[in-house]
Image (cartoon, rainbow, N blue to C red):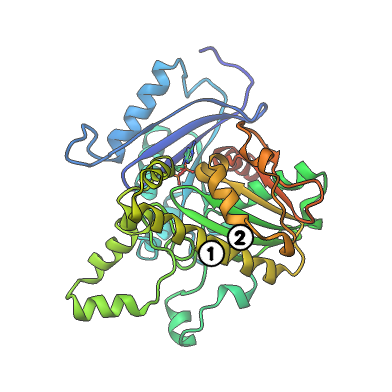
């Protein structure tokens, strides 16, 4: 590829066993190319660690005809899950900042270490480019104290930075801005609920462009029922299992993160298959679905009350964008609360931003595809003033 004047950002999202990347063109907002490497470090995989994965990703980019040294690469944007108290803006990474980031790993042991590893390797492979971290917690940094504070011992909470941080912030911000654009008003004038329903799931309440509540907390475990995560449980469950079942804290944490949620209840986490299991009379799948929907409705009700007045409610992410049954059941019978879904619009196939509420629904209900990579790329360009 010859040198050109275009501006692109390579966005890297390194998870515990996966690494996804996209090369975003800032002019068009489109991904020039992208890909992912799964099952990193798993026994069956030929990719042993994130360094190998990133080298493989770079080789894939080269195969796709991308020369990272001459394609107009402005920055590498790294998605980092937990920013703790210290990081809540896009942050230019140097050795000192990375050392600080590493200290946060205790707060997010499942999520931050792979991101830090990805950052280190990417800096080694692309030493002359700006590397920028964009945090999933950033959007929720300014949650009101009443919503960010857990009612636990104040001194302990301060000492150990225990608060509700919130996650999926890049998505909640991007989708709420897109929703405002869709209904033709500035985000600052609207009260919104955003439901990000993917493998991980979270809800947020946003008043005039500022988040006022969100369902995830100190970690991405709190809140809605997810693919493999429990969401809300009585914290008493943890001490009870520790004492009565003799389970270690690590084991309990892993159970709540990896063996719970839809998977824990039904042995399936993909909604497409869950629906066919329900159709064929699988009682466990039915219960898992009902628990998921019940929890979701509870949060919607809570956020309608927190906001007092709501203008727009938006579904996003894999389930929110694609699963009409989930959207129907999440909002059924809420006419008196101001939500009337148009069944035909909801069931209509099609991607892109769309309205699914009836014309006379006081609250506008939308489906909007999220695009965290584009939001991260724009954050990088914004930080560099380009
Ligand atoms: P992640 O949190 O991994 O980014 P996604 O936002 O991509 O997750 O969502 C993945 C989930 O979306 C899948 O596990 C599946 O349950 C759901 N999903 C994807 N496509 C469809 C579809 N066409 N119909 C119903 N559910 C879908």
- In the picture provided, is 292 more to the left or to the right than 281? right
Q: Quarter of the image for the C terminus: give it.
A: top right
Q: Which residue is mark 1?
A: 215
Give the CA separation, mark 2 to mark 1: 6 Å
Categorize mark 2 by other alpha carbons within 10 Å: few (<14), some (14-19), many (20+).
many
Q: Secondary structure at mark 1?
A: loop
Q: Residue furthest top?
A: 2
Residue drawn at x 81%, y 57% as measured from the top left: 189
Q: Residue 80's mark?
A: none
| Front one among 154 and 248 | 248
**Are circles 2 and 1 on residues that touch, CB within 8 Å?**
yes
Tell how many labels. 2
Residue 347: percent from the left, percent from the top? 61, 38
In the image, residue 153 lies at what x, y percent?
46, 87
- Residue located at (63% from left, 67% from top): 301
- Residue 337 in the image: x percent, y percent? 72, 64
The residue singled out by tag 2 in the image is 204
> Could you tell me which secondary element the residue under label 2 belongs to?
strand
Give above or below for 19 relative to 83: above
Give the left or right position of residue 152, taking residue 386 as reference.
left
Taking the view exactly as shown, the residue that stands out farthest to the front is 281
Specify whether residue 132 is in view: no
């Amino acid at each position: 590829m010859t040198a050109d004047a275009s501006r692109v950002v390579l966005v890297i999202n390194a998870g515990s066993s996966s690494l996804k990347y996209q090369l975003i063109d800032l002019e068009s907002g489109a991904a020039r190319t992208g890909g992912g490497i799964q099952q990193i470090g798993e026994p069956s995989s030929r990719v042993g660690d994130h360094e190998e994965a990133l080298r493989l990703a770079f080789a894939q980019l080269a195969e796709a005809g991308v020369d990272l040294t001459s394609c107009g690469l402005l920055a590498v944007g790294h998605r980092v899950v937990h920013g703790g108290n210290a990081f809540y803006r896009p942050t230019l990474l140097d050795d000192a900042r990375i050392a600080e980031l590493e200290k946060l790993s205790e707060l997010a042991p499942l999520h931050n270490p792979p991101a830090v590893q990805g950052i280190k390797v990417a800096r080694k492979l692309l030493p002359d480019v700006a590397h920028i971290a964009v945090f999933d917690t950033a959007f929720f940094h300014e949650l009101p104290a009443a919503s960010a504070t857990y009612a636990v011992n104040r001194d302990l909470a301060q000492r150990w930075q225990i608060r509700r941080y919130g996650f999926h912030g890049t998505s909640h911000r991007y989708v709420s801005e897109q929703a405002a654009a869709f209904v033709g008003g500035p985000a600052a004038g609207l009260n919104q609920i955003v439901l990000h329903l993917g493998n991980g799931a979270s809800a947020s309440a946003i008043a005039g462009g500022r988040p006022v509540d969100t369902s995830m907390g100190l970690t991405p475990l709190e809140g809605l029922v997810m693919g493999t995560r429990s969401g809300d449980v009585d914290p008493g469950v943890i001490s009870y299992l520790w004492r009565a079942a003799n389970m270690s804290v690590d084991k309990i944490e892993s159970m709540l993160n990896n063996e719970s949620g839809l998977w824990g209840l039904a042995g399936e986490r993909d909604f497409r298959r869950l629906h066919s299991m329900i159709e064929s009379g699988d009682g466990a799948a039915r219960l898992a679905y009902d628990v998921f929907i019940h929890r979701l409705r509870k949060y919607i009700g809570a956020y309608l009350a927190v906001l007092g007045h709501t203008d727009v409610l938006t579904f996003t992410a894999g389930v929110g964008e694609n699963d009409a049954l989930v959207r129907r059941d999440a909002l059924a019978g809420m006419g008196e609360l101001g939500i009337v879904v148009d069944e035909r619009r909801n069931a209509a196939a099609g991607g892109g931003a769309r309205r699914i509420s009836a014309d006379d629904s006081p609250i506008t209900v939308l489906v909007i595809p999220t695009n965290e990579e584009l939001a991260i790329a724009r954050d990088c360009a914004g930080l560099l003033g380009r």
